[in-house]
Amino acid sequence: MIKQAIIPLAGLGTRLLPLTSVFAKELLPINGKPGIEYILDECIEAGIKEVIFIISKKKLMIKKYFYNDKFYKDIIKRKKDPRIINEYKKILKYKKMIKFVFQDKPLGTGDAVLKTKKFIKGKFFLMLLPDDLIVKQNCSKAMITLHKKFKSSVMASMKVKEKEVSRWGIYNIKEKISTKNFIIKGVIEKPSIKQAPSNNAVIGRYILPKKIFNKLLKLKPGKDGEIHITDAIQSLINDNNKFIGHNFSGKYLDCGTMNGYINSTLEIAKIWKFVWLALDTLG
Ligand code: UTP
């Protein structure tokens, strides 16, 4: 059973400058709720019991968000506001399941993952990249079900426009297992249109084997001088480890770019407007 998830949060967030010059992008509100809480709710619903946050000194604000107890206790004592009491209870629930580890320098996603090595207990763990929100369906839950069936690694995927392949990890298919699931032949980090073997992109949800840490330890920096998780995955595939690409059913929202972030806030507001209207009709 997969009970642990890791969330790399130590990147610089340059695509969301100037906001990220002083603010952690994962705390930016999407319809009044920080993006990271959507990710945590997805984990909880998927049965995850422990989440490891990889942060840096520049991202200490994220730890503070969950560790502001004295502030909450003082305010609650003075105001006794039920809304604040409820919000604090929610924060406490999240805090109980979060562990923090540090990546001092943003040397790449692979290097970030390596920082969790000594904390991973099971043979497999879940990784979520918080820039990628998937709403309407719980992608992690569907991937864990798939993992149980095939006992293999799984990566979320979707088709992207050919001219946009260089933004993603791109994989090609070895074998189709069903309409939405494929055995992966190989994966390449942010290829040019010419290099790209397909337009199947890896989206930020992964079920990875613990043995990926040994690969990461041996890996040399790849594209742009960073250590990429994609390169470690390719090395595992070369050793005949099975990776399944899962075309998820939910709606993908990109929160890592300014246009994507603005669009995500609009899309989630639309979903909530629909919920409020439905509740209103029911009286
Ligand atoms: P990205 O490279 O896509 O995003 O990392 P970024 O670095 O945060 O932002 P840009 O590209 O400068 O706009 C994907 C995920 O991996 C984390 C990031 O925080 C993000 O959640 N990451 C990236 C790390 O934790 N450490 C790194 O060294 C690099």
Image (cartoon, helix red, strand yellow):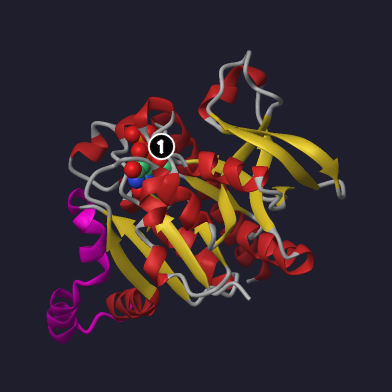
Q: Position of residue 102 (x, y in %)?
A: 26, 58
At x 31% / y 40%, what residue is drawn?
107
- Ligand 1's quadrant is top left
Relative horizontal placement of residue 205, taking residue 30 as reference (left or right): right
Q: Compared to 41, does 224 lie above or below?
A: above
Q: Is residue 236 left or right of residue 84?
A: right
Judge whether 231 appears above or below 239 on screen: above
Residue at 59 percent of width and 24 percent of height: 165
Which image quadrant is residue 63 in? bottom left
Q: Residues within 10 Å of mark 1 (few under 14, many from 20)?
A: few
Residue 229 pos. (x, y %): 49, 44
Instruction: Give the camera-side residue of 58 and 280.
Output: 58
Q: What amino acid is labelled 1 in the image?
A: Lys
> In this rendering, is residue 99 above or below 232?
below
Residue 61 placement (x, y as % from top left): 21, 57
Question: Would you say the magenta stretch is mainly helix, strand or loop?
Answer: helix
* Magenta extent: 57-83
Q: Is residue 8 visible?
A: no
Image location of residue 233, percent across then percent down = 58, 45
Name the residue rendered at 54%, 23% in the picture: 166
Q: Which residue is mark 1?
A: 220
Q: Is residue 243 left or right of residue 149?
A: left
Q: Residue at x 58, y 70 (%)?
A: 123
Is residue 78 part of the magenta span, yes or no? yes
User: What is the quadrant of the C terminus in the image?
Assistant: bottom right
Closest to the observer: 221 or 50? 221
Question: Element at badge 1?
Answer: loop
Quarter of the image for residue 227 reads top left
Location of the N terminus (image quadrant): bottom right
